[in-house]
Amino acid sequence: MQAKVETLNVFPVKGMSATRRDQVILSPGEGVPGDRLFGFARPGSGFDPTAPEPLPKEKFVVLAKEAGLAGLQTEFLDGTLQIAGAAGTTVFDMNDPAGRQTAAQYLQTVLELREDAPPEFVSAAPHRFTDVSVVSPQMMNAVSLLNLETLRAFEAATGEDISPDRFRANIVFSGLPAWAEMQDTGTEITLGSVVVRTILRTQRCAATEVNPETAERDLKVPYLLRRTYGHMDMGVYAEVISGGTLSTGDQVTMKL
């Protein structure tokens, strides 16, 4: 089986749905362009766009707490946020303070957020709202990878059908032996003309319990990982060390 890139995902707004790409341009030490540059911070988060500091994901509207986010299909382009939900499609101009406030109130209503005040739409590019931004600046700009063979081994061990979309990886590939990418940090993986080096295994949280099709919390993925393997890891974070254009279908190799 030839190992290849299956899917490329960009998540412009933290916690919201992916934008599929056929191609991305990656640069050394940088994350996926446009990935997690925006977020909806919960009231009192303490985020200061003039002096951005990493915050834990609990400070944002994310799937770990709000399963209903999976029921919203979103697109974000040139400052326009489009949200499609059960009540139809609504478009917000996020370049306008009134548009940002309206979008925040929309989320507060649709998701039945517990706070009295709506969340705040925040950004401070090149600051990224990645879950591991709190670890280091290097981790803030890491890309996330998922090996479908590892996921399939997990499915076989548990008897569950588990969508790769639960794991919200930037790069999903197939064809490498299961768990190969997670054996040793510092392993180099070549994806087309791009080379990345693994720096951290991805520990999974309650966000993966949410079914991306039904927006229901229907499978305790972290528990199943721990019960089956003694850890809650699925996928890896990696640093881009040699950049280039990466496309779906590109060959994937690593030293085994």
Image: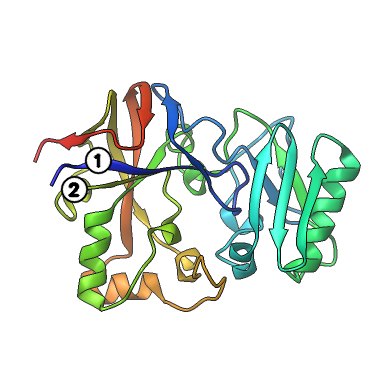
Q: Is residue 230 something that shows in the picture?
A: no
Disc 2 is placed on an element classified as loop
Query: What x and y, as percent, mark residue 230?
Result: 24, 70
Q: How many marks?
A: 2
Residue 164 is drawn in which quadrant?
A: bottom left
Disc 1 is placed on an element classified as strand
Q: Residue at x 86, y 49 (%)?
A: 101
Q: Return the residue at label 2.
A: 175
At label 1, which amino acid type do we have? Lys
- The numbered dot on residue 4 is 1
Q: Residue at x 44, y 58 (%)?
A: 165
Identify whether 114 is placed above or below 186. below
Disc 2 packing (10 Å; few <14; some 14–19; many ≥20): some
Residue 63 is drawn in which quadrant?
A: bottom right
At label 2, which amino acid type do we have? Gly
Q: Are marks 1 and 2 in contact (CB under 8 Å)?
A: yes
